[in-house]
């Protein structure tokens, strides 16, 4: 096949220095944190794909079932000839559900995990030969611009998986407002949002019995060791994830099993026993709660679909 992907790099070729700075500032902050975007090195992206298959991790299969059911309605709302832009495209699996039905002629996948992005979009281009496929390696927690060769008259944003939940509500609003500025009139945004529910179901989804989520979390330490030379031993940390109902979020942490001192460049990072690195938030919304947030960011809600157990929501917003 002659399928090709137009690649746009929006990350510095060697991102280690900026990554080191960002990680260091998080690890020297009180309380210690590390942005969840660093969970997605190649191994982390693979582990995340495994998480999506876990019996306890309901979001992926629930969202996919919703999309499969309502894709004709989405196609109607999107209309023909738009450019589809996916944020955090990962394995570019979910978008296939849309491509079967929507008549878009161009797709742009944006992801921070470079090789993973390239491989996934190549497979997509091979499977959909009529589709013009672009891939942009970018950190969309920073303001993004569309690659210059893409000047769509109309755009449909696709932000599945409740990745929006990694942002605080305030950051989510800012992200959505930033995206709003990129959207020409008549554009839409299809966004998956996980819903508040029984705490046991939520906590099981982030504490699976096979230990894949723990591995995904601990893999961050291997990455920091390998890429930044941080002298850190994963055996001295454990995975901890819980739901905080007051903030309506899952928090994921790496808890130090012992008091320890880490060397990082010329810095020293001290841990008390039981002190943690906060590695992820995953906010859970109610349908009206998310609609209000989207409205504050300038969007009008057109449709919202929820599965019959009320686990997950998919919103179609217009700019
Ligand atoms: C990709 C951010 C939506 O928050 O559920 C899965 C990531 N972390 N298990 C989520 C994740 C632990 C996931 N998001």
Image (cartoon, grey):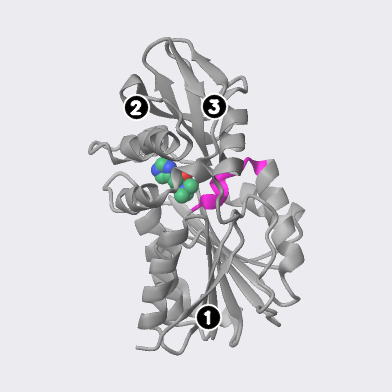
> Distance from label 1 to label 2 (Cα)?
46 Å
Question: Which secondary structure type mostly characterizes the magenta part of the structure?
Answer: helix
36 to the left or right of 51: right
Query: Residue drawn 33% across and 48% down?
Result: 47
Residue that appears at 33% across and 34% down: 214
Residue 265 marker:
3
Residue 190: x and y, percent? 57, 66
- Nearer the observer, disc 2 or disc 3? 3
Q: Is mark 3 on a helix, strand or loop?
A: loop
Is residue 128 something one can see in this rendering? yes
Asked if disc 1 and disc 2 are in contact, CB closer than 8 Å, the reply is no
- Spatial CA span between label 1 and label 3: 52 Å
**Span of residues in magenta:** 162-169
Ligand 1 quadrant assignment? top left
Residue 285 lies, with reference to residue 224, above or below; the image says below
The residue that label 2 is drawn on is 234
- First along the sequence among labels 2 and 3: 2
Give the numbered dot on residue 75. 1
- Which of disc 2 and disc 1 is earlier in sequence? 1
């Amino acid at each position: 096949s002659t399928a090709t992907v137009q690649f746009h790099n929006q990350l510095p070729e060697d991102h280690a220095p900026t990554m080191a700075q960002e990680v260091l500032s998080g690890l020297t902050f009180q309380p210690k944190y590390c942005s969840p975007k660093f969970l997605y090195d190649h191994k982390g992206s693979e582990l995340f794909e495994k998480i999506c298959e876990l019996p306890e991790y309901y979001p992926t299969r629930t969202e996919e079932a919703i999309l499969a059911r309502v894709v004709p309605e989405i196609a109607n709302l999107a209309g023909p000839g738009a450019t589809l832009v996916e944020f955090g495209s990962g394995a570019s699996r979910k978008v296939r559900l849309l491509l079967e039905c929507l008549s878009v002629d161009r797709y742009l996948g944006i992801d921070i995990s470079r090789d993973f992005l390239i491989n996934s979009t190549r497979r997509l281009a091979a499977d959909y030969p009529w589709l013009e496929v672009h891939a942009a390696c970018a950190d969309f927690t920073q303001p993004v611009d569309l690659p210059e060769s893409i000047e769509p008259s109309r755009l449909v944003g696709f932000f599945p998986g409740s990745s929006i939940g990694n942002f605080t509500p305030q950051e989510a609003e800012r992200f959505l407002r930033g995206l709003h500025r990129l959207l020409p009139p008549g554009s839409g945004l299809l966004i998956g949002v996980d819903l508040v529910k029984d705490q046991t179901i939520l906590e099981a989804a982030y504490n699976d019995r096979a230990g894949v989520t723990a591995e995904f979390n601990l893999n961050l330490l291997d990455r920091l060791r390998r890429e930044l030379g941080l002298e850190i031993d994963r055996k001295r940390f454990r995975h901890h994830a819980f739901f905080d109902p007051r903030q309506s979020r899952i928090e994921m942490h790496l808890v130090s099993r012992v008091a320890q001192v880490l060397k990082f460049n010329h810095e020293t990072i001290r841990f008390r026993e039981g002190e943690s690195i906060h590695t992820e938030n995953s906010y859970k919304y109610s349908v009206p709660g998310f609609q209000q947030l989207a409205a504050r960011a300038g969007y009008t809600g057109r449709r919202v679909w929820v599965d019959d157990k009320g686990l997950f929501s998919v919103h179609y917003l217009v700019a």
